Image (cartoon, grey):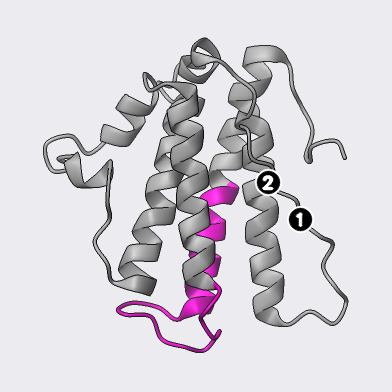
Amino acid sequence: MTDKIVVEELSPEATETEALLFALERSRMQFAWKTGGLDAAGLSRTHPSSTMTLGGLIKHLALIEDYYTSKWITGEPMGAPWDRADFDADPDWEWRTGATDRPDELYALWFGAVGRARKAMSSIRPEQPSIKGPNFRRLLVDLHDEYARHVGHADLLREAIDGLTGEDPPR
């Protein structure tokens, strides 16, 4: 991945929302590290007996970022490539196509979705109800849970590809 996510240490005086945002940003950073720097062969490699790929994970988390932002914060329809997908006919569309998309497209898609989510989140108060669904705290917890689950998958897949292990990228 060409962009870099840097997470500053959490202040001891941090609010609840700042702590939740810190956890989310740290998980995003871990995910970027575990999926970064790979070519198409690395991003499309599976780990038996799963069909999951790092490319599919990248595209899936881009979808999740855009979906949460659209549904719970902005209320605006999701744009490309989501508006072209027929999820009713192919519920695993992002997983399937993410395994064959070009690495630069996948990385740009994910970083773009993260950027849109950050921008939308920057203007929200923690107790503010969302357009429909949970409040901002709940949105952060749910989004962090999604990352926590998939960073674990990325750990296993990346170690099988080139042996990369660890919790955080080197500083």
Q: Mark 1 sits on what residue?
A: 7
In percent of the image, x 54 and y 57: which residue is there? Answer: 145
Q: Which residue does the numbered mark 2 point to in the structure image?
A: 29
Which residue is located at x 69 percent, y 42 percent?
Answer: 4
Residue at 36 percent across and 18 percent down: it is 100
**Of the residues shown, which amino acid type is indicated by label 1?**
Val
- Highlighted range, magenta: 122-148
- Across and down, in percent, residue 78 comes to 27, 56
Residue 101 in the figure: left or right of residue 37: left
Q: Is residue 67 magenta?
A: no
Q: Quadrant of residue 88?
A: top left
The type of residue carrying mark 2 is Met
How far apart in space, not on screen, are marks 1 and 2 (Cα)? 7 Å
- Relative to residue 39, is residue 96 depicted above or below? below
First in residue order: circle 1 vs circle 2: 1
Q: Is residue 61 above or below residue 21?
A: above
For numbered disc 2, what is the local secondary structure? helix
Q: Position of residue 80 (x, y in %)?
A: 27, 44
Q: Relative to 105, is 49 above or below?
A: above
Residue 119, position as x, y percentages in the image: 51, 66
Picture quadrant of residue 155: top right
Residue 147 visible, this orientation? yes
* Residue 58, position as x, y percentages in the image: 48, 36
Nearer to me, 82 or 149: 82
Q: Residue at x 31, y 26 (%)?
A: 97
1 and 2 marks in contact (CB < 8 Å): yes
